[in-house]
Image (cartoon, rainbow, N blue to C red):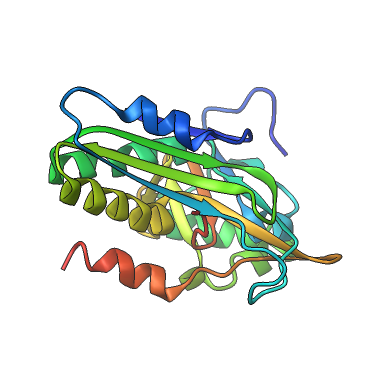
Amino acid sequence: MTSTTPATSSLSVRYFAWMREHTGTAMETVTLPENVTCVGDLVPHLTAISQGHALALKNMQAVRVAVNRSYGDLDTPVAAGDEVAFFPPVTGG
Amino acid sequence: MAVRVQTEDFDVGAESRSLQADAVGAIALFVGTVRGLSSDNGVTAMTLEHYPGMTESELERIETEARERWPLEDVTIIHRVGRLEAGDQIVLVGAASAHRQAAFDAAQFIMDFLKTDAPFWKAEERGDETSWVDARESDDVARKRWTS
């Protein structure tokens, strides 16, 4: 869950739509693991959090990624303090 | 620059009048609405979720791209969120220009990019069942024609 005073070595992870339902959370603070430099490095650490996380992030082909509210991909760099979001292809309009 | 994400309904006439200006000779308005029960899918209502902050920045980026492509006097993009029922208005795109072609094309361009890039998600209700809408390949195709 979101901590009130995030450590400098943490980042925020947000989930939307059915990914939010699978993970059971809209936003969580995650301690930045060592050797994580891009979104793709982060994913295995997130899928280890719960079965719901593993389900949500099972098929990364079907998931879109944003870092600090701009579209990215698995190669987009991440650092402490960033906001990383995972969501399904969008369906507005 | 007018991008709004809101739960409230909007007044198409008022939005049209707000796009009128001395140099404007053409206003193209697109309004998207919730299809009713008698249409193909039996949807009774839907709930729209979005990514606050990113939604607005994506819509502003799309508006900026449209303004770079066409000589637009003004643009309005309004998208509703929350629970909407059959017949409700969902989205309005308005483009004002001196002449019609730029207004028509810009409104279509903005809608095509909104569909594929703006972070909104629809959950549809059919009776007691709720399901997330899948993205449509035809929307990707519609977007690609502007980049080819």
Residue nearest the viewer, comparing B117 with B110: B110
State left or right for residue A33 relative to residue B29: right
Q: Residue B83: percent from the left, percent from the top?
A: 71, 46
Residue nearest the viewer, comparing A49 with B69: B69
Residue B30 seen from this side: yes
State left or right for residue B137 relative to residue A56: left
Residue nearest the viewer, comparing A77 with B128: B128
Please tell me whether residue A54 is drawn above or below residue B72 in the rendered image. Answer: below
Q: State the residue at coordinates (17%, 47%).
A: B102
Identify the image quadrant of the N terminus of chain A.
top right
Q: Quadrant of residue B59?
A: top left
Q: Residue B50: percent from the left, percent from the top?
A: 57, 45
Please tell me whether residue A81 is drawn above or below residue A16 in the rendered image. Answer: above
Please tell me whether residue B55 is drawn above or below residue A35 in the rendered image. Answer: above
Q: State the residue at coordinates (30%, 44%).
A: B62
Q: State the residue at coordinates (19%, 36%).
A: B25
Q: State the residue at coordinates (37%, 35%).
A: B76
Q: Residue B84: percent from the left, percent from the top?
A: 68, 48
State left or right for residue B22 relative to residue B88: left
State left or right for residue B17 relative to residue A85: left
